[in-house]
C-alpha cells in the first residue's frame, strides 16, 4: 500500500489496494491510520458492488442511516447522491460536516463514484484541526467553554421545493433535530483539538441568540474554509473518498450543468462529540 499526499495539509491517495477483496485486519488498520493522518483518503479505479462497499464500510464500525435523506430500497445502508442531466441542484454545495445536528454525528463517510461528468463535480475538503490551531490563544480560550446548537432546520426549510429541483431526496418525515455540541471538539482517536462548527447546521452558541452568535460564527466559518486548509479531489468513475467526519468539512461543486453524476454514500456511526 502506498500513500501519496495530495496537499501539505489534508488528503492522500492510497495506491495498491483492491477494496473488493476481503482485506486483512492489518490492511484495514493501515487504512484507518492513513485516515487519521490525512483526514480524507482517496482510492481510484475500484470496481465495487453495493454489497462490497457495505462490507468495506463495516470494517470501520456499524453503518448509520441518514435520518434526513432517502436511501436505496435495495440497500438501505446506501444513500444515493445523484444529479440527473435535467437537475438544477445538488446536495452538499456549501461547506459542511455531515449531519452534525445528530447527537452522534457520523464518524466518517465513504463516497463511491459510479458515474461522473466529463469535467466538473469535484469535491473540496477542509482540515478542522488547522482551523482551530490557527486561532489566537485568547479566542481559543473563549471558545473552549462554549457549546453550540446544531439543527436540521436548514434542510427542513422548503424541503418540498428542494426535492423538486434535485434527485437526492429528503425524506418526507424529517422532523426538527436539534442538539448541542462543544465548539472545540477533541478527536477521540488522535486526541487533537478541532473547531467543530459549520455554516448550514450550527445555528447559535448555546445560551446566546442567533443574532448574538452570528458575527463570531461567521468569522469561524470563514476561517475554517481558507484555501490553505483544503484539498480538491477530481473524481473518475470508480473513485472512492473516505473522510473523517469528526475533523473535516467538505463542499460538492455544482459546476456541470447538463451532465449526470451518481455517487453512493455510506456513513459510519459516530460517538457523542466531547
Ligand atoms: C456530500 O455532501 O456528502 C456530497 C459530496 C459530493 O457529492 O461530492
Image (cartoon, rainbow, N blue to C red):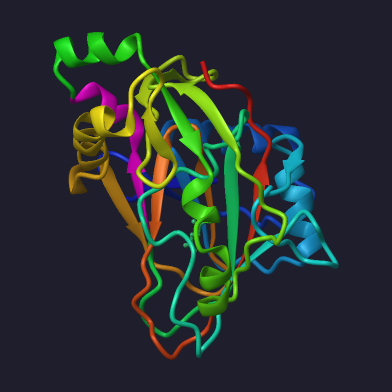
Drawn side of residue 123 relative to residue 36, left or right = left
Task: Report the residue at 63% width, 62% height from top.
Answer: 170
Task: Report the residue at 55% width, 54% height from top.
Answer: 156
Q: Relative to the observer, which residue lies in front, 90 or 20?
A: 90
Which span of residues is magenta-colored? 124-134
Whether residue 88 is visible to the viewer of this picture, yes or no, is: yes
Q: Relative to the observer, which residue lies in front, 242 or 75?
A: 75
Drawn side of residue 94 relative to residue 272, left or right = left
- In this figure, what is the number of numbered marks? 0
Q: Which residue reaches farthest right?
A: 74
Q: Relative to the observer, which residue lies in front, 202 or 2?
A: 202
Residue 79 falls in which quadrant of the image? Answer: bottom right
Q: Residue 143: give x, y in percent of width and height.
A: 29, 15
Whether residue 14 is visible to the viewer of this picture, yes or no, is: no
Q: Residue 195: give x, y in percent of width and height.
A: 34, 27
Is residue 101 part of the magenta span, yes or no?
Answer: no
Task: Report the residue at 67% width, 37% height from top.
Answer: 28
Q: Relative to the observer, which residue lies in front, 219 or 56?
A: 219
Image vertical order of residue 175 relative to residue 213, above or below? below
Image vertical order of residue 238 relative to residue 271, above or below? below
Image vertical order of residue 274 relative to residue 157, above or below? above
Residue 136 falls in which quadrant of the image? Answer: top left
Amino acid at each position: 500500500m502506498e500513500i501519496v499526499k495530495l496537499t501539505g495539509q489534508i488528503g492522500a491517495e492510497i495506491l495498491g489496494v483492491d477494496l473488493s477483496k476481503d482485506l486483512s485486519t492489518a490492511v484495514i488498520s493501515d487504512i484507518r491510520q492513513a485516515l487519521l493522518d490525512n483526514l480524507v483518503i482517496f482510492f481510484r479505479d475500484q470496481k465495487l458492488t453495493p454489497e462490497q462497499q457495505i462490507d468495506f464500510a463495516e470494517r470501520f464500525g456499524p453503518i448509520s442511516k441518514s435520518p434526513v435523506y432517502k436511501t436505496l430500497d435495495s440497500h438501505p445502508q446506501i444513500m444515493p447522491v445523484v444529479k440527473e442531466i435535467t437537475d438544477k441542484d445538488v446536495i452538499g454545495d456549501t461547506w459542511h460536516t455531515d449531519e452534525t445536528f445528530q447527537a452522534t454525528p457520523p464518524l466518517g463517510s465513504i463516497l463511491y463514484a459510479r458515474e461522473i461528468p466529463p469535467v466538473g463535480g469535484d469535491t473540496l475538503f477542509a482540515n478542522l484541526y488547522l482551523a482551530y490551531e490557527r486561532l489566537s490563544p485568547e479566542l481559543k480560550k473563549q471558545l473552549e467553554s462554549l457549546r453550540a446548537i446544531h439543527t436540521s432546520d436548514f434542510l427542513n426549510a422548503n424541503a418540498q421545493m428542494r426535492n423538486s429541483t434535485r434527485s437526492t431526496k429528503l425524506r418526507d418525515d424529517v422532523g426538527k433535530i436539534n442538539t448541542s455540541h462543544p465548539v472545540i471538539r477533541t478527536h477521540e482517536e488522535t486526541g487533537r483539538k478541532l473547531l467543530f462548527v459549520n455554516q448550514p447546521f450550527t445555528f447559535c452558541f448555546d445560551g446566546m441568540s442567533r443574532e448574538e452568535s452570528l458575527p463570531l460564527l461567521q468569522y469561524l466559518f470563514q476561517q475554517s474554509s481558507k484555501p490553505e486548509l483544503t484539498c480538491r479531489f477530481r473524481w473518475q468513475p470508480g473513485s472512492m473518498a473516505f473522510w473523517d467526519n469528526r475533523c473535516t468539512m467538505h463542499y460538492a461543486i455544482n459546476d456541470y450543468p447538463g451532465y449526470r453524476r451518481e455517487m453512493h454514500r455510506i456513513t459510519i456511526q459516530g460517538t457523542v462529540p466531547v
